[in-house]
Amino acid sequence: MSTLAWTDELVLNQPELDHTHEEFVALLNRYGELLDRGEDALPAFKALLAHTEAHFAMEERWMAATGFEPENCHSSQHAMVLNVMREVVRYAEDLGDREPLSIVRTELSQWFPGHAEMMDAALVYTMQQRGFDPKTGECRDPIRAPAEAADADADAVPACGSASCGH
């Protein structure tokens, strides 16, 4: 049984991000398969954590390059998820408690689709609007430095990347 199916609803039409998301789903499913078989899933979970750290770091670089506010709810979600994942590893390694491994599987599989469809879609939209090329790191419409902008926040992308966000 698959923990999370890769479906068209998860495709954001941003090749690098779609590939990274597909890898995330595959690693989540591999870890889930090991749990289902009663095997040691910790190494697979640690591989998922390492991938997720790199995945989120990539998105964080893109957010910075396209002008997301430094303190934003997208980044906050990343930090919270990584904190929980690291705690699961700590519980397993330091306390011998493997129960969180089963719990976090369900939580990640429920969290990820909404995050991708809302937060990551807003990032992709902002990248498109700003003409950001993730391969080169170049941005057609970069954020102006505060000294150049009449209002330093005029170009900043709201907290979650959505123009309707009140954060």
Image: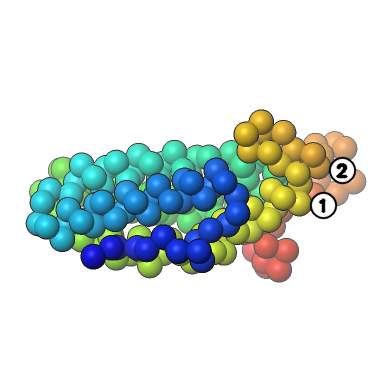
Q: Which of the 4 quarters of the picture holds residue 125? A: bottom right
Q: Amino acid at mark 2?
A: Ala
Query: Where is the C terminus found, in terms of image quarters?
Result: bottom right
Q: Which residue is mark 1?
A: 154
In this view of the protein, which residue sits in the foreground, 12 or 43? Answer: 12
Q: Badge 1 local density, few (<14 within 10 Å), some, or many (20+)?
A: few
| Percent of width and height locating residue 115 | 50, 61
SS of the residue at dot 1?
Answer: loop
* Left or right for 102, reference 116: left
The answer for how far apart the CA atoms under marks 1 and 2 are is 7 Å
| Percent of width and height locating residue 50 | 35, 39
* Left or right for 53, reference 35: right
Q: Badge 2 local density, few (<14 within 10 Å), some, or many (20+)?
A: few
- Say if 57 sits above or below 121 in the image: above
**Numbered tag placed on residue 164 in the rendering:** none
Residue in view at x 68 percent, y 67 percent? 166
Asked if one can make out residue 155 in the rendered structure from this viewpoint, the answer is: yes
**Numbered tag placed on residue 149 in the rendering:** 2
In this view of the protein, which residue sits in the foreground, 82 or 140? Answer: 140
Q: Amino acid at mark 1?
A: Ala
Disc with the residue nearer the chain's start (1 vs 2): 2
| Percent of width and height locating residue 37 | 11, 57
